[in-house]
Image (tube, coloured by chain):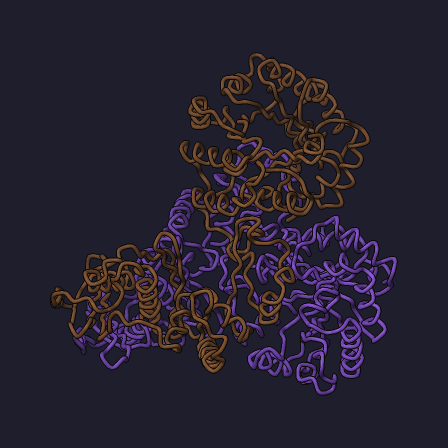
Chain colours: A brown, B purple
Amino acid sequence: MNKDLKDKIYILDTTLRDGAQKADISFSVDDKIRLAEKFDDIGIDYIEVGFPASNPKEMEVFEKLKGKKFEYSKIVAFGMTRYKNVKVEDDSNIKQLIESGADAVCIVGKSSELQVLKVIETTLENNLDMIATSIKYLKKYFPEVMFDAEHFFDGFYENPDYAIETLKVALEAGADYLCLCDTNGGMLPHNVIEILDRVNKKIRATIGVHFHNDSGCAVANSIIAVTRGIKMVHGTINGYGERCGNADLCQVIPNLELKLNKKCLKEGNLQHITSLSRFVSETANQIANPGQPFVGRNAFTHKGGMHVSGVSKLSTAFEHVPPEAVGNTRQILISELSGKKSVILRAKEFGINLEDDLEKVSEILNRVQNLEHKGYQFEAADGSFELLVREVTGTKKKFFKLESFRVLDEKKEDGRMLSEATVKVQINGDRIIETAEGNGPVNALDKALRKAILSRYPVLSKITLTDFKVRVLDEKKGTAAVVRVLIESSDGVKSWGTIGVSENIIEASWEALEDSIIYGLMNVGENTGENTGENTGENKDSGNKNSG
Amino acid sequence: MNKDLKDKIYILDTTLRDGAQKADISFSVDDKIRLAEKFDDIGIDYIEVGFPASNPKEMEVFEKLKGKKFEYSKIVAFGMTRYKNVKVEDDSNIKQLIESGADAVCIVGKSSELQVLKVIETTLENNLDMIATSIKYLKKYFPEVMFDAEHFFDGFYENPDYAIETLKVALEAGADYLCLCDTNGGMLPHNVIEILDRVNKKIRATIGVHFHNDSGCAVANSIIAVTRGIKMVHGTINGYGERCGNADLCQVIPNLELKLNKKCLKEGNLQHITSLSRFVSETANQIANPGQPFVGRNAFTHKGGMHVSGVSKLSTAFEHVPPEAVGNTRQILISELSGKKSVILRAKEFGINLEDDLEKVSEILNRVQNLEHKGYQFEAADGSFELLVREVTGTKKKFFKLESFRVLDEKKEDGRMLSEATVKVQINGDRIIETAEGNGPVNALDKALRKAILSRYPVLSKITLTDFKVRVLDEKKGTAAVVRVLIESSDGVKSWGTIGVSENIIEASWEALEDSIIYGLMNVGENTGENTGENTGENKDSGNKNSG
């Protein structure tokens, strides 16, 4: 038990408050409730939900939370010390904190002489009084009050005695945690070591840290602070926050738990952090960073040939932690630099054993290299790679045969833009002709193809295109350059990437689209018996409904 | 001079080698040459261009570089120590290094006992011999040989004596730099301090570090290493690299120069690092991270009301470094003043004085903000920005009026792909209809438009499209997402960028194309008298040569 507390690091998640300061994030009230519930599930100690005085929506979140009982987490309301000329009991921001019904409050005050004199424009003495009176007053209402020492690190370099004085005043007034903030985010690890070592000599308290990432060191600074004895870390999921963001808890927590043997989350929950990260990025409508340490899609992805052969011999050889510890997975990519071993490993993932057929492996590698020379890139196109392997090994199924297609884009006299596509395909000898409109040529083509084959392969309705990327290769050739199209598709559970390359963007898009659909039909409908290509149905030749 | 050397930190950029290991990056030979030229411009000490033995494309880069003389940078070829059972003079990888014609070589060898025994599968003694013989041999051909001590940090924790022994052997064989690699990227700053302090006691050499970012600490580790006396840092622009990437030089270099007073780039070039970062992300077709420290679009963007008022009182209050030091800009959301000033400045550049017409300036700003909200981006589209200003100020000329256009893309039964466009335009009341084929819909449209108007505006023949870029915004909407097209055009002397945004890629392309041509006609033909829109000519209504 004693050992338990010794290794405990308290986590305060401020995704819902500081994280929401990111330029393009805006959480609804319901988003905040749903996210707070997730943070409770994984076992975050403190959830800083918002700043009640900042706008009415914030207060609404606290109102809704009053009805809920969280199993693990404590709800924290954020506020400021009293205004410089107002008595604490009359301060509206303090009143709203009290009304919030939160389990604890965190109030921010200035620890920098420069900030007090030039930004707040008050005296150093009054600033100390603002801190003391606010904390003392709030302690009557809340069992736990945290003091956020804003600009503490910068302030310490300006005037260390005054910075320490703000902490002492807060501690004497009853603050339970003193949280040292690097508000401008400019600190480097050696600054943090120096300052914390000096603070530790001057004051005995439960100290926390709150780092912004402007120097790119927020994660490192949080960790180094723990090695200097601090007990609480503030941060956000995925590092969201103003400017360059806050310390990313998805990186801080795994480092602390797996490498420093600290306890941060509720026991046994670290393996859920990858899924939490993705849930939060979905809710915040942010594109996930594939290279995000620990939880990113590529965090355990191996590309180089040398590395791949290393990983197959000894996985710790090229992985700093086991991916399953954080709920992530290992991925092996195919690329120009990689060799036979990675082809064999990848094929095994989708159930094809090539170990005893090195001739086929060579043929696959040759094809990949030729295609990559033309601009293909199979790293992001696992679906197209599987189809290539299946073609070489004779296990690819044909669901339809394209006869021809035609896409018409028109800019009308009235300025309207129209795109319309017609596809002609054959299924088991039947010709099917369908036409559809879309809000662009590729969208029209996608719709026409689906219209043509859906009745034969109803499982297609489960498959959606989730991502569409276009890259112009050799851009200097202007509009005559080669174009690479990447499509990502999903059936709601599994997702796959496919690729097309051509001088003609429509042809490249078709190629990626066709691969996406074939891959989907082969893998999604596996248990439905609908992907044998043997279904019959009436001839759907509906003619070309529109003329160009 | 002595002081100069004391503060010098040598930078090795491995964007073109290790950076290219990022899952979705694939540089062409020309990309690599163009990037190397940029690295020379900004003054990177060493550019690691590639691994000649890995594939023929890599050797092609070295062949092309043989003809170039770089002003500042040295070209480095990357390779491995000799293969375990091969004599160094017979090793094909070593031979190719020698043939590369590089200024220096960097060869990787193992410093971890575990890796030697389990991955390379040779004896500890032979591994030392592989390092020694390879370096000694290469020193006959190259003035500078670097030793990349792979898995040094992990290896040090397994067996410190052996790890140090590999360094000593390399040093005695003549290595000029010993580069300690955190190959798995799992080190934390306190590990780096501990290990470097122990290394420094055992060996005196010029030491470098090479960090991967799997623990999220690559930047911090590089910086803390410099505080422990190392003299070289390896990294990549924007932190590109396998898995979670390498140390981001766009963060490491500003931290070292601005905060530790070190010299990294050629004097006076730090202010170009933001533009370099953006050039590299465009070339690599990577979405730039707006929150990237120092160089990201939002790195100095202030959103919170408190912060904005703070910044306006005292900019250092909320900024760790001045944005102009790294060539970035402060952005204050909602603030108008800074925006107005830059509109006036930019309009002056093309000869429009707006100082006394603040109403027009506001209208321009409003339009820009609305358009940027829809996905436009005028930074790379100076041509479209000028046309917008000319529209508001009534100085835009009309050269032709589009009536309608139509593009047909067909995939024929025999597999051939055909694109054909018809445009209908009016010039001085005359209708002109022209059709052309192209190797894609946009190319066909470009050709048809030129065919329609060239005889009226012969100066058009001087204008070529030099660059064409497509970016899918909001990629998650699949083929129905909004698309941004950027076109760069040139008359051989001046070049200009134009932009179009639409859900329909054809419409977006048309918009950028039309702006490109109009801008060109306004600016290129200035002295020819051909851009007045008053020319007459016979009615070129040639009918629609093809039917859809």
Please report the residue visible at 57 percent of the width from the left and 45 percent of the height from the top: A250
Q: B513 or A262, which is in the foreground? A: A262
Q: Is there any visible trace of residue A411 in the rendered image?
A: no
Q: Quadrant of the C terminus of chain A?
A: bottom left
Q: Is there any visible trace of residue A352 in the rendered image?
A: yes
Q: Quadrant of residue A141?
A: top right
Q: Position of residue B540 (x, y in %)?
A: 20, 76
Q: Quadrant of residue A533?
A: bottom left
Q: A310 or A500, which is in the foreground? A: A310
In the rendered image of this protein, does residue A212 appear above or below residue B21? Answer: above
Which residue is the extreme one toward the front? A356
Please report the residue visible at 32 percent of the width from the left and 56 percent of the height from the top: A464
In the rendered image of this protein, does residue A264 appear above or below residue A324? Answer: above
In the rendered image of this protein, does residue A198 appear above or below residue B78? Answer: above
Please report the residue visible at 87 percent of the width from the left and 63 percent of the height from the top: B204
Q: Position of residue B412 (x, y in %)?
A: 23, 78
Q: Quadrant of residue B1?
A: bottom right
Q: B280 or B116, which is in the foreground? A: B116
In the rendered image of this protein, does residue A207 appear above or below residue B158? Answer: above
Q: Position of residue A522 (x, y in %)?
A: 32, 65
Q: Quadrant of the N terminus of chain A?
A: top right
Q: Position of residue B422 (x, y in %)?
A: 23, 72
